[in-house]
Amino acid sequence: MPPQTALIIGASKGLGLALVKKYSSLIGPSNVFATVRSTVSDDPNAEEIKPFPEGVRVIEDIDVSEKDCGEKIVEGLQGAAVGLVVYVSGVLKPEEMGKANWDDEIMMYTICSIAPVFVVQSLLMSSSLAPDAKIILLTSEAGSITLRTEGEGGGMYGHHGCKAAGNMVGHLLSYDLKERGVSIAMIHPGFLKTEMTKNAGMEEFYDKMGAVTPDEAAGPFAEFAEKLNLEISGRFWAPMGARGIGNAEEVLGKEVTKKPGPLELPW
């Protein structure tokens, strides 16, 4: 069964926006909370607000690089307890040896592996999670140490590092959440055709690696979310299987690449 209420953090575009639309169709827009960074007063065009189905409960002015982001999300829920929390927010800054950027790395780690702890903590301590709630963190296969290879090479230090840290954070959170009946999973939603991957120079790999649109990824994502429970909590999953994971065949074997999702990924 789909959740009665859903909270999508980082919902203005990409997969976040696709999930807002998906869950609006499944449970009704009024049961979907969506966080965005801008506010109507700050943005006269309100471009981040317009794409949502009418009735979605938008929580504005949420910047997950700020330490009060969890508290502000709780305020925006106005006492509601959500059954599904999806942390989509992320940032990708390309790096290579000799051009590593301190501030970019701080931003990536903050958004992808520090903020999730404080968001979950705020939701939990304020009783903003429904009984048997589910939490999903988008860490992507980039956070797998096992899937990195010499052929792929180095670089992208902050990108891979913050995603790996996000996986560890989610795994540790699973122990704290288990006694409260809350499950959590880290996922690779697929290789997505988004502004983020395009700006990082990954567009040239879309066809070769089977990239999908956020709308295409939203379906398998929602199906996995329904299956998530305490037995598989704290683990790392790819709802679409090995599709879009460039090193899957080399590292995991050809047979694995033929199997449908969900696929459990190595750390």
Image (cartoon, rainbow, N blue to C red):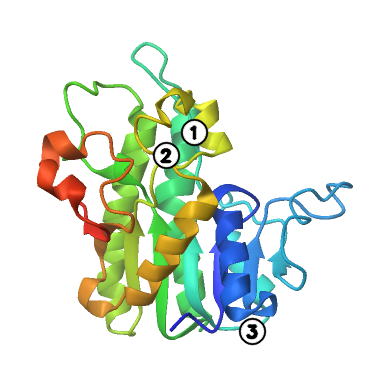
Residue 79's tag is 3
The residue tagged 2 is: 211
**Residue at the (21%, 77%) spot, across then down:** 231
Crowd tier of the residue under label 3, counting other residues whose Cα lies within 10 Å: few below 14, some 14–19, many 20 or above: few
Residue closest to the eye, 24 or 82:
24
Labels 2 and 1 touching (C-beta < 8 A): yes
Residue type beneath disc 1: Thr
* Sequence-first disc among 2 and 1: 1
Q: Secondary structure at mark 1?
A: helix
- Labels 2 and 3 touching (C-beta < 8 A): no
Q: How many numbered marks have been drawn onto this rendered protein structure? A: 3
> How many C-alpha atoms fall within 10 Å of the one at disc 1: few (<14), some, or many (≥20)?
some
Amino acid type of the residue tagged 3 in the rendering: Gly
Residue 141 position by quadrant = top left
| Residue 117 visible in image | no
Residue bearing the label numbered 1: 197
- Please give the name of the residue rendered at 61% of the width and 56% of the height, measured from the top-left corner: 17
The correct choice, above or below, for 5 with respect to 122 in the image is below
Question: Where is residue 16 drawn, in percent x and y?
Answer: 56, 55
CA gap, disc 3 to disc 1?
A: 36 Å
Q: Nearer the viewer, residue 93 or 215?
A: 215
Q: Nearer the viewer, mark 3 or mark 1?
A: 1
Q: Is residue 210 visible?
A: yes
Residue occupying the point 19% across, 46% down:
257
Image side of residue 143 versus residue 148, left or right:
right
Depicted 2 relative to depicted 210: above or below:
below
Q: Which mark is residue 249?
A: none
Mark 3 lies on a secondary structure that is loop
